[in-house]
Image (tube, grey):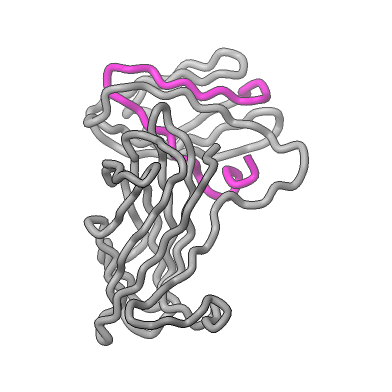
Amino acid sequence: MRDLMVRPGIVVLTPGFLTIVDVDESVEQAVSARSDLFEMRVFGNSIYLRPTKRAGTTDLVVTAGGRVFMLRLVIDDKNFTTYRYRIRYPRQTELPQGEFSSVVTQGEAKPPSAVKEATLPLQVEFTLTKAGEGLLLEYRALNAGKNPVVLDPARLRVQGGGKDLSFRLLWREGAAVPGRLLPGETERGAFLVDSLTLPVEVSWSATEVGTGRTLVVGGKWSEVK
């Protein structure tokens, strides 16, 4: 819940299906800039959403229990199921779920302690969340180097239990040219993974323009909430 007050969480809507968002406190208000994209009903602690369009993305700002949090609604017409989300208020300070991954340059054998985080040309934060029978993989990439970096979704690999998992890109934003981060640029986005098998391992190869170096970012998760 702490993250949703500063950064919207992803809620996937499927045409022809209802999506339910349950909140710990009674929902006082829910507003969106594009209410034409969906129908909404609020009953106590639950928000019921049904898309009226085949595609689209918008925000949903919710007030519940005197707190305000943000959601990003994504209509996915390639999806054929529905989801139920639960928004929990933390009882104590929690550590962020996302984590900056290490960056490894192919051809080098430097141990992690020999690489200073401040000099890494690419930093990527991943957040993994259960979404029905699948997995929502969100990322935030920062080009902290001096050269452009190409981050191609086709070079992303997601494995579950040692086997490749299929996925698709839901959205991405931030960079002037999607997938090509200039120095200092940040790109955010999300992938929907069709199934979830633990442990989950993410590996994403990027290319640094000018040097031609291949940078591999990723991580491994034995538990996903």
Find the residue positioned furthest to the right.
92
Magenta segment includes 27: yes
**Left or right of residue 152: residue 122:** right
Q: How many marks?
A: 0
Q: Is residue 181 above or below residue 129?
A: below
Magenta segment includes 14: yes
**Left or right of residue 71: residue 79:** left
Residue 190: x percent and y percent? Answer: 37, 47
Residue 91: x percent and y percent? Answer: 76, 37
Q: Quarter holding the C terminus?
A: top right
Residue at 35% across, 25% down: 38
Residue at 41% across, 37% down: 197
Residue at 49% across, 31% down: 31
Residue 62: x percent and y percent? Answer: 56, 32
Q: Is residue 176 visible?
A: no
Q: Is residue 135 above or below residue 216?
A: above
Q: Is residue 199 visible?
A: yes
| Residue numbers of the magenta segment | 1-28
Find the residue positioned furthest to the top.
43
Residue situated in front as seen by the camera: 174 or 101: 101
Residue situated in front as seen by the camera: 182 or 122: 122
Residue situated in front as seen by the camera: 5 or 96: 96
Residue situated in front as seen by the camera: 100 or 33: 100
Q: Quarter holding the N terminus?
A: top right
**Left or right of residue 59: residue 153:** left
Q: Is residue 207 above or below residue 210?
A: above
Find the residue positioned furthest to the front.
162
In which quadrant of the rendered view does residue 153 lie?
Answer: bottom left
Residue at 46% across, 57% down: 219
In which quadrant of the rendered view does residue 210 lie?
Answer: bottom left
